[in-house]
Image (cartoon, grey):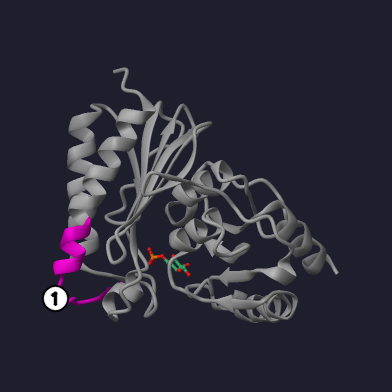
Amino acid sequence: MNISDEKILEKLTELERDCGEMMLRAHRIMAETKSGRRDVVTEYDRRIQEIMVGELGAFLPGTRFFCEENDLQESLSAEHVFVIDPIDGTMNFVRGFNHSCISAAYMRGGELTASAVYNPYTGEMFTALKGGGAYLNGRRISVEDAPLSETVVCFGTAPYYQDLTDRMFDMTKKLFRASLDIRREGTAELDLCSVAAGRAGLFTELMLSFWDYAAGMLLVQEAGGICCTSDGGPLPLTGEKSSVAAGSPKAMADYLRIIRE
Ligand code: IPD
């Protein structure tokens, strides 16, 4: 079936806005643990994923899915694949921080071509189309190409990987010293959106799943930024977990110099 990336993006934003209402109305949120006490899921994560998979499957018959919940991780080399994190920032959601998002990316023939990240608490919808730029609520956004010393750094703690804790805090200390300040906001996708919108100059985390960064990766690239592994290598599009660093060209150059020192 031949549906344009624009139509797919329209469908993603419509679905995310609808599902965002569920997040806003959520009450008595019960968390269950997955791989460990920090890795949580709620009935809302599962329900939103079910709705999105059902609707997108009907919209684009035969499409594959690579999603956070319910072990729904199909091959990313299929012609049409949706990469979905129904709630990115589940710990924030459970604990009432009002800073979480719904994230979806579309891959055509193994390439990221459309993405939408929605923060229902602020009503901010971040969208990108390959070759078509990045937008916030329809307004074009771009990275702020400032050196690290003139910008703020977002970082993730890779909370499920205790073997990375010392390395992560050592690196964060260096980045704090080199920048204006640091932020740990609790959702990798919204951190990447902050880079794309020029709010933060850099984001880094030592281990993420593909659904935590696929949509944000396209957003950062379309906003004129760079997305790579934490040591500057290419990010895999094959679904394996990876470290991620993303930022404006100047902030990334400073970051790579600092971590190589
Ligand atoms: C998590 C968030 C968090 C990051 C974790 C992710 P989830 O995603 O993005 O900021 O530090 O590594 O797993 O589990 O809330 O979808």
Name the amino acid, label 1: His
Answer left or right for 72 relative to 183: left
Which part of the image, by quadrant, shows the C terminus? bottom right
Total numbered circles: 1
Q: Residue at x 37, y 80 (%)?
A: 37
17 to 107, vertically: above or below: below
| Image x and y of residue 194, in percent | 50, 61
The region drawn magenta spans 20-33
Residue of label 1: 27
Q: Residue at x 24, y 76 (%)?
A: 31
Most distant residue in the top direction? 2
Which part of the image, by quadrant, shows the N terminus? top left
Rate crowding at label 1 as few (under 14), some (14 to 19) or many (20 or more) other CA atoms within 10 Å: few
Residue 173 figure quarter: bottom right
Most distant residue in the front direction? 139
Answer left or right for 138 relative to 54: right
Residue 109 visible in image: yes
| Image x and y of residue 222, in percent | 55, 41
Q: Quadrant of ligand 1?
A: bottom left
Residue 31 belongs to magenta span: yes
Residue 239 belongs to magenta span: no
Residue 38 figure quarter: bottom left
Q: Residue at x 63, y 49 (%)?
A: 225
| Image x and y of residue 11, in percent | 26, 37
Residue 231 visible in image: no
| Image x and y of residue 20, in percent | 22, 58
Distance from mark 1 CB to nearest ligand 1 atom below 8 Å = no
